[in-house]
Image (cartoon, grey):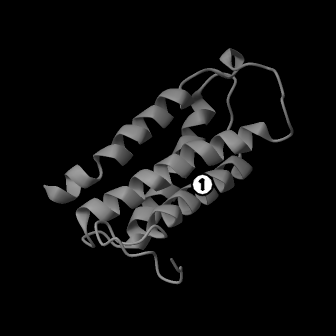
Amino acid sequence: MRTFRSLVPALVWTAVIFLVSTVPGDRFPSVSLFPHQDKVAHLFLYGTLGICLGVGRRWGGDRIPHLTLLAGGWLYGALDEWYQSFVPGRSPDPADWLANVVGVTLGYLLVLSLGSPGSGAPARGSSR
């Protein structure tokens, strides 16, 4: 049960991503602030998922291997891209999936780099 509870934030965030993915393409603003802004959006959404997975790992201990959590995030990113092929005005894009993978990985590694919870110790390789 502890393992499931530790993953609740990630499960909630996947629901947020799913809701965003259900929005038809014509409902998104057509304003382009900078090139590849959609990739930045993917990086943010999936970076947040990576953070949630990393926090889940910390809360749940080492019950779930790192690679399993990361692969779960990567797979969800791929399924999300596939799902968008059924949403009007949306389409799957391998570059979006790559942004999803990078986001999950960076978010997860960010949490791991913060050191052990409650130890007060810096992450390995850092100094105070």
Q: Is residue 5 above or below residue 20?
A: below
Q: Is residue 4 left or right of residue 89?
A: left
In the orientation shown, which residue stands out farthest toward the front? 128
Question: Which residue is nearer to you in this view: 115 or 75?
Answer: 115
Query: Is disc 1 surrounded by few (<14), some (14 to 19) or many (20+) residues within 10 Å?
Result: many
* Secondary structure of the residue carrying numbered label 1: helix
- Image x and y of residue 102, in percent: 63, 59
Residue at left 47%, top 49%? 49
Q: Is residue 71 above or below residue 38?
A: below
Question: Which residue is nearer to you in this view: 54 or 102?
Answer: 54
Q: Which quadrant would the N terminus be assigned to in this image?
A: bottom left
Residue at left 53%, top 57%? 107
Q: Is residue 125 left or right of residue 11?
A: right
Question: Which residue is nearer to you in this view: 42 or 126?
Answer: 126
How many numbered markers are drawn?
1
Residue at left 53%, top 25%? 22
Identify residue for label 1.
Answer: 103
Question: Which residue is nearer to you in this view: 47 or 124?
Answer: 124
In the orientation shown, which residue stands out farthest toward the top? 27
Residue at left 27%, top 73%? 62
In the orientation shown, which residue stands out farthest toward the left? 1
Residue type at mark 1 is Gly
Q: Is residue 80 left or right of residue 2?
A: right
- Image x and y of residue 31, in percent: 82, 21
- Image x and y of residue 36, in percent: 81, 41
- Image x and y of residue 56, in percent: 32, 57
